[in-house]
Image (spheres, rainbow, N blue to C red):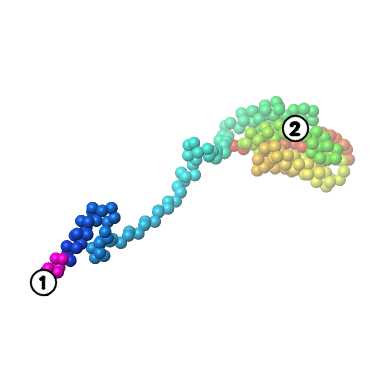
Amino acid sequence: MLSVAASRSRLLIFPLLALAVSACTENPIELPLFAQTQSAPRPMAKPVQQKPSAAAHVAAPGSGVVPPVPAFIAPPLAVARVGSYMDSLESDLRRHVHGNGITIARMGDDISVILRSDRLFAKNGVLAADDILEPLGALLGTYVHTSVMVCGYTDTVGPAADNLALSQKRAKAVADALAHEGVAPQRISSQGFGETHLKVATGDDKKEPRNRRIEIVLKARPG
């Protein structure tokens, strides 16, 4: 009988012979399970998700994306420049807004644009003055440091209450038209005065075209 030591030697010889043979062949011989060493697979790391930074919203050069352009904000108007600012506005008004039935008046630093109603409204009462309000609105839209108060007046024909309502309606129509032409609505106000503050003093129930008018009062807003 073989000794225990000889038996153990034979057990070690067979794996060594198998390794030598597998090294010389294309198809390696698998070792017994006890001769193979296996390690547990490592768990895959989860990708780290980064929050987009503020810079991610800025278009990269050559991306074809046009970044938004910040709106232009006019610098504040200094009190010392109010006079020259209104001088410039008056000059532009006299250059671009003129014609029959239109008067531009200056009192201190305030400017009034006086428009006869028959130049603004058709006989059926519809506002029909694009030739006046379009250039006026475009001009006032650039003079952002002014307030625009639209005042309506009538003559003394008809009941006073009706004249007041009519003057308010017409003043609002002109104010809305100026806003449509580009003047910021928050700069505009309107008010009707009816047959009060007559341009030409008359008795009751007297037609007077100069009393039927719209006065647009422009005031500087420094700061």
Q: Nearer the viewer, residue 150 or 41?
A: 41
Where does the image place residue 91, in percent across and percent down from the top left? 67, 26
- Residue at image point 70% right, 42% down: 189
Going from the N terminus, do you reach mark 1 or mark 2 first?
Answer: 1
- The residue that label 2 is drawn on is 132
Segment colored magenta:
6-10
Quarter in which the C terminus is drawn: top right
Q: How many marks?
A: 2
Q: Is residue 29 above or below residue 164?
A: below
- The residue that label 1 is drawn on is 3
Q: Nearer the viewer, residue 110 or 129?
A: 129
Residue 34 lies in quadrant? bottom left
- Residue at image point 67% right, 32% down: 139
Q: Nearer the viewer, residue 66 or 75?
A: 66
- Residue 166 visible in the current orientation: yes
Q: Secondary structure at mark 1?
A: loop
Q: Is residue 94 above or below residue 17?
A: above
